[in-house]
Image (spheres, coloured by chain):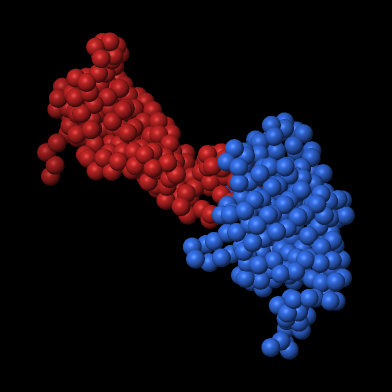
Amino acid sequence: MLNYTFDWSTITSGKYFDWLVSGLITTLKLSAISIVLAFILGLVIAVMRMSHNKPVRWFAHAYLEFFRNTPLLVQIFFWYFGSYKILPAAVNDWLVSTNFEFAAAAIALTIYTSAFIAEDIRSGVLSIPKEQMEASRSAGFSYLRSMQYIILPQAVRITIPPLVNQFLNVAKNSSLAMTIGVMEMTYQARQVESYTFKGFEAFTAATVVYLVLSILITALVNIYNEKVLNVHKAA
Amino acid sequence: MITFTGVHKWFKNLHVLNNINLHVTSGEVLVVCGPSGSGKSTLIRTINQLEPINEGSLVVDGMDLSDKKTDINKLRAEVGFVFQQFNLYPHLSVISNITLAPMKIRNIPKKEAEEQAMLLLTRVGLAEKRDAYPSQLSGGQQQRVAIARALAMKPRIMLFDEPTSALDPEMIGEVLAVMKDLALSGMTMIVVTHEMGFAREVAHRVAFMADGILLEEATPEDFFLRPQHPRAQQFLRQLLTPMQAE
């Protein structure tokens, strides 16, 4: 028999509940900011990776290999503990006066994820028939504007399933930010556990939050697919 | 309007265009024909520089294509191109396919671009398809939308690269009718096609190519009744009576 009395009331009301909610809000903020920035940066890197300009292409290639092939935790530590040593004093002062932990975590998550997103988008672009580029070039669009209006909108549609995976990874990977003191969901659950010894309840709450967040992201992208992109009609 | 002078092009070791000299005047309809692999598609693709030339000079609407300072995007905006495989943008509705370039390149306001697109759609007989997507249209309908899309830029020249070759036989007529209507309106057109009925009826001049060489240029009447070059004679025999050839 279980020799443990569940006590959900500790975490469903009062101070500890407030901690968990503030953790949830931080996780949501961190994930949302990182997803949006990583997507934009990923698009830029993907276009650079396919550029006809060799230095630009090589830079993007090096960026991809570097950030895909080093652990996220190391990258978080690098931005948090390492970057201030090479930054000018004025920038450091400003960073410390804001929320530096949060910024370092957002930067690390954004850059790390953008490398994966760029590769997903690139494989999407390569799957678009070259005649689409010919058609838009012959209408008078430049290479970049052809990308913008014709190629990328089609590539992103194809890329949506792998992109959803990347977005889910951001939400879940954001828990690593607790290691540098960002007071997000996992940090707060651990905090509650330390104060109350109600580890099971606290981490069950965290688990449910991540689960719901992931399902929500998947559902949002699916709705966007159906309603905004008309994926089925434009198949 | 279009002048080729001593134009050469190679794909690796293959001499696809061999000393092409050709002049097309404003309002003229030129049909280019010849066996497959003769370089006729490459010829019209050089006109909007989908294929750059290696040697010689090519002047299109006053713009010299061998001059590096020529704004190639500006040239392409003046030259409509219709592909064998239509190449509509599958993620955009019919009306958006047509209005995209006028809005983004010519900076025409959306409302005006859509009004103009509807006029063009009516002209090609597809006004009721404005909100359909390319995948919902037949091949013939897609090609007519592609023609409307090219016309929306108000081009000075229209190029057609085997526009009916990918179509089922019963859809060829509807596309040729649109092209004939366009030719009668005075558009400068170069058409690569095997539709000899169209050539006979609409073209002012027929050019015959084989192995990258422009072998013959003649009025349709002369070309079909009195072909000069043996390759042209053979080509026409095969086209008219494919079962008896060779």
Q: Residue at x 72, y 42 (%)?
A: B62
Q: Quadrant of residue B215?
A: bottom right
Q: How many marks?
A: 0
Q: Is residue B246 above or below residue B32?
A: below
Q: Quadrant of the C terminus of chain B?
A: bottom right
Name the residue: 62% across, 39% down.
B70
Say which residue appears at 19% left-offset and 24% top-offset.
A82
* Quarter of the rendering containing residue B235: bottom right
Residue A42: x and y in percent read 40, 38
User: In the image, residue B192 lies at what x, y percent?
Assistant: 71, 63
- Of residues B207 and A223, the one nearer the viewer is B207
Image position of B37 with respect to A173: above or below = below
In percent of width and height, residue B67 lies at 60, 42
Q: Colour of chain B?
A: blue
Residue closer to the observer: A71 or B147:
B147
Tell me if B224 is positioned left or right of B108 in this view.
right
Determine the image quadrant of residue B83.
bottom right
Image position of A155 (left or right of B144)? left
Residue A48 or A1: which is nearer the viewer?
A: A48
Left or right: A79, with B169 as reference point:
left
Q: Residue at x 77, y 54 (%)?
A: B24
x and y percent of residue B30 in the render?
78, 60
Q: Is residue B136 visible?
A: no
Please indicate, yes or no, whether residue A25 appears anywhere in the rendered image: yes
Q: Is residue B43 above or below residue A82?
A: below
Q: Is residue A32 above or below residue B228?
A: above
Chain represented in red: A
